[in-house]
Amino acid sequence: MRTIHCPQCSVRLDVPDAAGGKAARCPACKTTFQIPDAGEMLDETVVCWLDLDRFHADEEKEEVMDASSVQSALSTDPAPEQESPTDDTLDLADAKPEPSEPEPAPATQSDPPEDQLSLEEAMGEEPSQPNTHGSFVAMDAVDDAVDTAAKQTKTETPVTHQQYTGKERRRPLLQVVDVGAFGVRFRFHVRLFDLPGFRASMPMKCIAGGEPTNLIARPLPWVDKATGQYVNPGEIEARYELNVRSHQSPREVLATMSPIEQLPTPFNQPIPYYVSREKAKDVSLHCQTFHTPEGVQCEVVIPSGGYALDWLGRVNGVCGEDYATLEAEVLKFDAKAWRSIPQEVRHRLGAWFDFDAGENFLGYFNDSDFARSEAGLAGIVLTDHRLVHCKYHHHGSLQLTDEAHIAAIVDGQFADLKAKLANSTKRLVRLRRTDAVTLSNMLQKLNAKLSMGFYKPKPKPEEKPDKDESLE
């Protein structure tokens, strides 16, 4: 199997190797198109019309790989051959892998202490109510995590950020510096400003939501190079933004965008990105420059992982390791459970939570001492690898493989969580009782060694009156 993109909607599609030249129907937009051969795919990316000979003039010719060399180096473990489709049109919606069921793990349970409550007792008779207190949990994400864990092999290695630096088959035009809850941070050399093809390579769709219509084009704001009073990126973006007309190409947009007077050469040459009019007030990109022994480098943060992946594919191509690595990261950050959280809450979570390599987000539980409007400042984040907690200046994490126990002390509609470790006890957060029960169910479903139980509060000792205040 190999990967192509629909020419109409750009959705990612997997097709058989032998399907080159066949007609195919996109399952998303129903567009019929011809599947390109593997060699033709290498000629369709922006990297082939960026005038690379001029950009790489200081590099040796041996470092530039031709299409046949790239194709032979793509994989040392090719997929098995498949029969060509018999129909004239190949419906790509039919090619779906068969799901495999995870193997259930035996559950072991010891006798609970006398003050321990069952889940039914901890839940009480309170009926389930819609989320009104700032927690965001998707139970189907737990099922996906369990299925994924069952399919993984022992030889599989997790994706790490170190794979992005210095390991590409050749120096990429776009380098992925970091990936996190904030988005994707790209780096490129200042010489790329001289290439019109690169400056017109941003995908023509909303950088925040992916909408392809009702767009505004804005230049990347290099405010650290600005002169005068323009120190706010939004001021430069708003002054030079353009309304994108229907059927207008990226090169036509670039040709109509004026040079930025407040920036020196070459930063005055605009690199347009696109945002819908509905989301224009909520989007502004962060750009900066810095000096290195190789010259001036430029960095830009793309808030949407999907948009960043499309831009990387248009510039570097979709056949390199950098694209595959970023794709794995984007799938993690664009998971359904993570997207269900409002962007403002995700930004707050980014101050104390960041994804580890190969980690999948499952849910966030807001600390009950914080209002829904303050969601993200404190609470618990659960992934398929660990439980991360934060409240005020106290934060940390527990691995799901740790031999530890979380005691939830039920107090009315709330539960105080404490982690009992081998030699210590750590206070975690305070959750609503219903959230604590949901967290316990998720840990059990994940077959985590990290256990959780519910307990009655210890009776308070009777207060003795002071001798001076006692009546004789």
Image: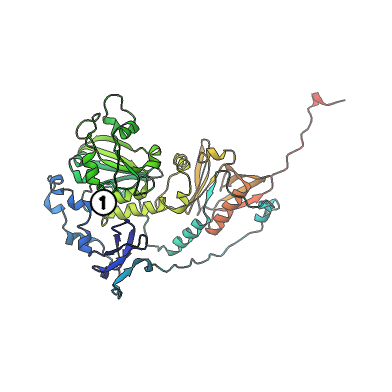
Q: Quadrant of the N terminus?
A: bottom left
| Structural crowding at the residue carrying mark 1, measured as other residues with C-alpha within 10 Å and reported as few (<14), some (14–19) or many (≥20) | some
The residue nearer to you, when weighing 34 against 156, is 34
The residue nearer to you, when weighing 237 against 406, is 237
Give the image quarter of residue 182. Answer: top left
The residue nearer to you, when weighing 214 against 466, is 214
| Residue at 66% across, 49% down | 455
| Residue at 26% across, 57% down | 319
Q: Secondary structure at mark 1?
A: helix
Where residue 398 sits in the image (x, y, percent)? 51, 48
| Residue at 24% across, 61% down | 74
Question: In the image as oriented, which residue stretches furthest toward the front?
Answer: 246
Please indicate whether residue 461 sits to the left or right of residue 200 in the image: right
Q: Is residue 349 visible?
A: yes
Q: Quadrant of the C terminus?
A: top right
Give the image quarter of residue 89. Answer: bottom left
Please indicate whether residue 356 sits to the left or right of residue 257 in the image: right
Q: Is residue 80 visible?
A: no
